[in-house]
């Protein structure tokens, strides 16, 4: 009997991409996606451990699923990801109705563990301390027909005191350039127009095989893939950011002028306590160099408010850097104390009320800056990759949404003389008519509309399926033809 599956993903882009790999394996094992998330024969929770409430979120979901499990004993529940790597056997102690627990280093084990749990009629917990199979060797059922994640590395060699990721994802492991390019070509062969290169510290790519300029070379090599229209990457580390990467961004037409550069704090004293190996002047100098090479670049960031011992002066330093940086948007976080991280044991943990007040002030400042910057774009013509599900009010406003090349979200009116039916995955050009803090609006007629194969696939309900790419040599030559084909779309 065919079994159905549903995957629920929490956390970062790495987890989202891991879920694509999990879906690919399950489909190879004979599972099919479930139209009813709660009614699936298998529910996989792919967890995150970064935020303080991650545990509560997981056990809340597991509690919600318990009645389903009681009513349908044949149903299986699996828990993977960073929280599974951290909590291990504790999960089945607190939620004994869970069938499988697997970690970040063995996502390729899920089908076998599920079968073993059925055969043995008992929970299977398998957590490895190091990577068993590089995720790129696993098949992936992609979520999007027009945009795809491509991992260039896994793990992290940094020791930021607030971060639990290195202990859960391990040391950095780099894929060889030929493997990355093979996966990019495989996605393009399926109609994908945009790829995002993914790594915990994406610009330190190449450290494992001894090429400190490897990431800039990789960007240029991606630019040579015929049919690939947009290349993005996330997230770089300021300490490893080099001018050759900026040159590659500026000189490679398909590389988007968008940069996500995590600041974390504008205080040099706090950056030192965080073990962030750069200072605010270095951070701002990178932004100056980027904007000198690409004046239209949109720069986004991450900022943590309320790190232990952060003083009023430290926080004011952060506000000052934000004023100078002119970020197009920022992901702002209140410091979350995570057991197992060095910062969790630091003195001077700040009261919640102090952190909240600072957080509110930062958000207000950043929103005002983003609004000012977006207003400057009114009247500008932009090219959009039409997206699905990004505009929550699109149905009532009769708009659609898309991403500009700089990553900004634009809500647009899909009308104009000679304009046909616009689909997610198509390319349109329009003119910005209004700027809000978190998005842009283009309410005039479209200037152009290009139908794409990605749009055809969205319309047909097809999503790419890519096979795993095996290990290769560290070169930037053309991938072997056998690695660049995937055998066509499947439903």
Image: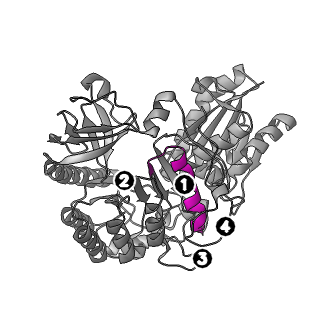
Secondary element under disc 4, as helix, strand or loop, is: loop
| Residue 340 can be seen in this image | no
Contact flag, marks 1 and 4 (Cβ < 8 Å): no
Q: Position of residue 306 (x, y in %)?
A: 34, 59
Return the x and y of residue 452 as percentages of the image width and height.
Answer: 41, 39
Q: Earlier in the sequence, mark 2 or mark 4?
A: 2
Mark 2 or 1 closer to N-term? 1
- In reply to whether residue 46 is colored magenta, the answer given is no
Which residue lies under the disc numbered 3? 209
Residue at the far top in the pictured view: 71
* Image point (46%, 52%), residue name: 195
Q: Secondary structure at mark 2?
A: strand
Tag on residue 333?
A: 2
Q: Nearer the viewer, residue 40 or 246?
A: 246
Q: Which residue is mark 4?
A: 472
Magenta extent? 172-194
Q: Residue at x 52, y 40 (%)?
A: 143
Q: How many marks?
A: 4
Q: Which residue is mark 1?
A: 185
């Amino acid at each position: 009997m065919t079994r159905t599956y549903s995957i629920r993903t929490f956390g970062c882009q790495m987890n989202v991409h891991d879920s694509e790999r999990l879906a690919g394996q399950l489909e190879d094992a004979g599972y099919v996606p479930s139209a009813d998330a709660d009614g699936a024969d298998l529910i996989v929770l792919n967890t995150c451990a970064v935020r303080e409430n991650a545990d509560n979120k997981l056990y809340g979901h597991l509690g919600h699923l318990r009645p389903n499990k009681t009513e349908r004993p044949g149903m299986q529940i699996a828990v993977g990801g960073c929280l599974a790597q951290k909590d291990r056997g504790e999960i089945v102690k607190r939620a004994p109705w869970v069938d499988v627990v697997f970690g970040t280093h063995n996502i390729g084990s899920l089908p076998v563990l599920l079968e073993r749990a059925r055969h043995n009629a008992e929970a299977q917990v398998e957590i490895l301390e190091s990577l068993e199979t590089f995720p790129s060797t696993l098949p992936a059922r992609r979520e999007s027909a027009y945009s795809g994640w491509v991992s260039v590395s896994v793990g992290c060699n940094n020791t930021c005191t607030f971060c639990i990721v290195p202990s859960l994802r391990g040391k950095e492991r780099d894929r060889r350039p030929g493997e990355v390019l093979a996966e990019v070509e495989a996605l393009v062969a399926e109609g994908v127009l945009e790829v995002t290169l993914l790594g915990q510290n994406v610009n330190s790519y190449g450290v494992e095989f001894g090429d400190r300029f490897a990431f800039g070379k990789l960007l240029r090599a991606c630019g040579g893939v015929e049919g690939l229209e947009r290349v993005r990457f996330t997230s770089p580390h300021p300490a490893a950011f080099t001018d050759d990467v900026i040159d590659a961004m500026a000189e490679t037409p398909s590389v988007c002028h968008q940069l996500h550069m995590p600041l974390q704090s504008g205080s040099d004293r706090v950056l030192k306590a965080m073990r962030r190996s750069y200072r605010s002047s270095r951070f701002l100098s990178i932004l100056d160099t980027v904007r000198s090479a690409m004046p239209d670049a949109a720069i986004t960031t991450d900022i943590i408010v309320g790190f232990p011992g952060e003083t009023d002066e430290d926080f004011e330093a952060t506000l000052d850097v934000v004023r100078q940086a002119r970020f197009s948007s920022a992901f702002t976080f209140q410091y979350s104390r995570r057991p197992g991280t060095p910062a969790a044991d630091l003195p001077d943990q700040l009261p919640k009320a102090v952190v909240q007040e600072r957080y509110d002030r930062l958000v207000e400042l950043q929103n005002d800056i983003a609004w000012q910057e977006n207003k400057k774009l009114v009247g500008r013509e932009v090219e959009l990759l039409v997206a699905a599900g990004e505009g929550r009010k699109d149905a009532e406003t009769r708009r659609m949404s898309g991403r500009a090349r700089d990553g900004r979200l634009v809500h647009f009116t899909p009308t104009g003389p000679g304009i046909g039916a616009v689909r997610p995955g198509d390319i349109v050009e329009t003119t910005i008519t209004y700027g809000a803090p978190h998005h842009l609006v283009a309410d005039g007629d479209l200037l152009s509309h290009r139908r794409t194969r990605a749009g055809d696939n969205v319309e047909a309900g097809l999503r790419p399926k890519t096979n795993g790419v095996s290990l290769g040599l560290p070169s930037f030559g053309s991938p072997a033809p056998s690695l660049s084909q995937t055998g066509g779309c499947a439903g």
